[in-house]
Amino acid sequence: MLRRITLYLILTALLVASVVSSSCSRRGGDGGKGKLQVVTTIFPLYDFARAIGGEDVSVQLLLPPGVEPHAFDPRPEDVVRVSRADLFVYTNAEMEPWSARLFRGITGGGKPQMVEAGRGAVYLLAGRGGAVDGGHDHDHGAGRDPHIWLNIANARVMVDNIASAMGGRVPEKRGEFLANAAAYKKQLDDLERRFREGLSECRTREFIHGGHFAFAYLAQSYRLTYLSAYGITADSEPSPRRMMELAKAVREHGLKSIFFEELLAPRVAETIAAETGAELLRLHGIHNVTRGELESGASYIGLMEQNLANLRRGLGCR
Ligand SMILES: [Zn+2]
């Protein structure tokens, strides 16, 4: 492990040194032609940054499509990409625990500015979302739940932080960035209203997810109760006991559906569905998207709309 880190640091230092010496100005690399260069970690940040920056900003998504984000480990070439950026936008220390290490790995002058998009967001403690069944959590101790973008009010805070950082870098475009952010936040308001109305009258307010514990913010926002098969990250297989508890909860609450997540094989959800006869529906955690989703123009708002449609179906909402 130590050897691997050492090798990583050496490779990183070499690559970054060559990048810094070959380009004095970071702006304008990668065909950006003088545009503000922004690198974001996960998909929601990428989507927000695109909406705010418009034509004036070049935005890159650091996570390769389809990569499970909690298991992501930046490669030396990722450090190089970040070192070329003007802004490096990440969510929070819990979502991207590697971000500080990556940033320290960038040597030489003119480091990008690090932007914590989740600064000022309202956090839940990991595994203890207000609406979460406290007796069933099986997380890895305290700490904040990283999945803040699944609360639309927090998404607005993230949009503001990104817009403000872009405006700070390019003051002459600040007004445009703020106007784009305001227009995008209007769309978020509308999305939030549709969630509130769409989930107001449902046959059940409980749902079971065969993935990791990503939806506490969403559950809390709309007074839903939620059980997941895995903890905050999907780093260990659910125990047979946990599987039995979930199947029992499906039967006890007469649930007609069980949800599965993106980028993780739906095997657990399938097993419980097969055992209980429940229907499988996707609930997208929107950490990252597949190449297919990216190419077909996936967006945070579009994926949230799909989530709403599936929740309404699964919970039997009017
Ligand atoms: Zn997650």
Image (cartoon, helix red, strand yellow):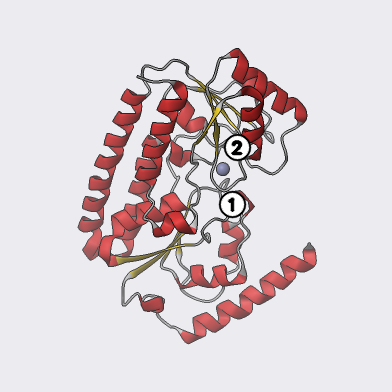
Q: Residue at x 48, y 59 (%)?
A: 291
Q: Which amino acid does label 2 sit on?
A: Gly
Residue 68 badge: 1
Mark 2 nearby-residue class (10 Å; few <14, some 14–19, many ≥20): many
* C-alpha distance separating marks 2 and 1: 12 Å
Q: Tell me: is circle 1 under 8 Å from ligand 1.
A: no
Asked whether the residues under the numbered discs 2 and 1 touch, taking CB atoms below 8 Å apart as contact, a structural biologist would say no
Q: What residue type is labelled 1?
A: Glu
Taking the view exactly as shown, the residue that stands out farthest to the bottom is: 22
**Which x, y percent locates residue 56?**
27, 66
Q: Is 86 displayed left or right of 176 in the figure?
A: right
Q: How many marks?
A: 2
Mark 2 = which residue?
A: 211
Mark 1 nearby-residue class (10 Å; few <14, some 14–19, many ≥20): some
Q: Which residue is drawn at 50% across and 80% down?
A: 20
Q: In which quadrant is the C terminus drawn?
A: top left
Q: In which quadrant is the N terminus drawn?
A: bottom right
**Which x, y percent locates residue 169?**
33, 64
